Image (tube, rainbow, N blue to C red):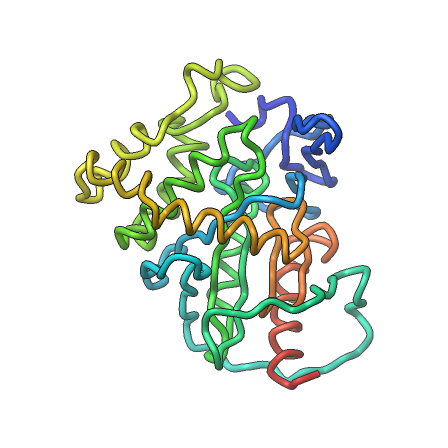
Amino acid sequence: MLKRLPFLCAALLALAACSHDSNSGNAAPQAAPAATSSAEAAPASPASSTAPATAGSAAPASAGTAAAAATAPGEPAPAVAAPAVAAAPFVDNGKWVEGKHYFLIDPAQPTSHPGKIEVTEVFSYGCPACNGFHSTVEQIASSLPPNAVMNYLAASFRPDENWPMYQRAFYAAQALDLVGKTHDAMYDAVWKSGELSTYNLKASGLKPRSAWPTIEDAAKFYAKYGVDPKEFVGVANSFTVNTKMKRADDLMKAYGVDSTPTMIVNGKYRFTASSAGGYAQSIELTQWLVAKEAAGK
């Protein structure tokens, strides 16, 4: 179904991005290849959704990982402990070049788990490229050594595609300790069943704005996991969630993120699947940067 989308942010073989018109403040989608779903094979070269350096919210644990716990207002989203994998020694053979494959975040941003190396995905449930990259992120999470944790930051910089609603839904789910159960299912609700899709998956393009899923619709989805819809909406509109959303937006600006999906390593390094050279390379580069941090290089 997703292959019918005529624009946005996923590609089979080449980079495509949704750009943002910084002068008008309106997101202006560029021509892009067809989107891929997470159920399909990951493309050789990733896609991304570009935008102004705004908006973000920490995202949920992937399948098989621990549920993300709620955080205090103003703190980054909780990290997810990775399975025990032997840490690889750091070897700099010149393959990965700063400024080409990955980029230094200056100044480096504090992390929320002292003593652990945080690996963060900047994503949105509403981003086709993130949906296509999702299985790769799961591989990254499962490949992390014991000294690293997986973290998530959900972007909201595409209000023209309803991303702020997805961000709010995530933070409400996080506050209710639901993300560990619902992360994969949210992608499916947006890109498979269409239950929470802003796109017309049976045709092409966006649905009319009046038909976009709302936070009340998201509450009905999360009700399947045992939360009262009224409680969910109340939490979603709370001061705590508003504060977390603002904190996430600020953190994303500090990271210098302008597209999704983007990977952040320990608040110090940023890269995309495109800059890494592909999905498989993203896994390898993550492991290398984690080893680099562990070695203090």
Q: Is residue 73 left or right of residue 147?
A: left
Image quadrant containing the C terminus: bottom right
Question: Which residue does the image show at 40% across and 26% down from the upper left?
Answer: 194
Q: Is residue 27 left or right of residue 231?
A: right
Question: Which residue does the image show at 49% across and 77% down from the upper left?
Answer: 116
Quadrant location of residue 211?
top left
Along the line of sight, the residue nearer the viewer: 173 or 202: 173
Can you give x and y, in whole percent of width and height, for residue 26 in the image?
66, 26
Compared to residue 215, the image places residue 272 above or below, namely: below
Along the line of sight, the residue nearer the viewer: 279 or 230: 230
Can you give x and y, in whole percent of width and height, for residue 144 in the image?
51, 71
Can you give x and y, in whole percent of width and height, for residue 168 in the image?
40, 40
* Total count of labels: 0
Along the line of sight, the residue nearer the viewer: 62 or 154: 154
Can you give x and y, in whole percent of width and height, for residue 190 in the image?
43, 32
Compared to residue 139, the image places residue 191 above or below, namely: above
Question: Which residue does the image show at 45% across and 32% down from the upper left?
Answer: 191
Q: Residue furthest front?
A: 239
Compared to residue 97, the image places residue 41 above or below, namely: above
Compared to residue 16, the image places residue 80 above or below, namely: below
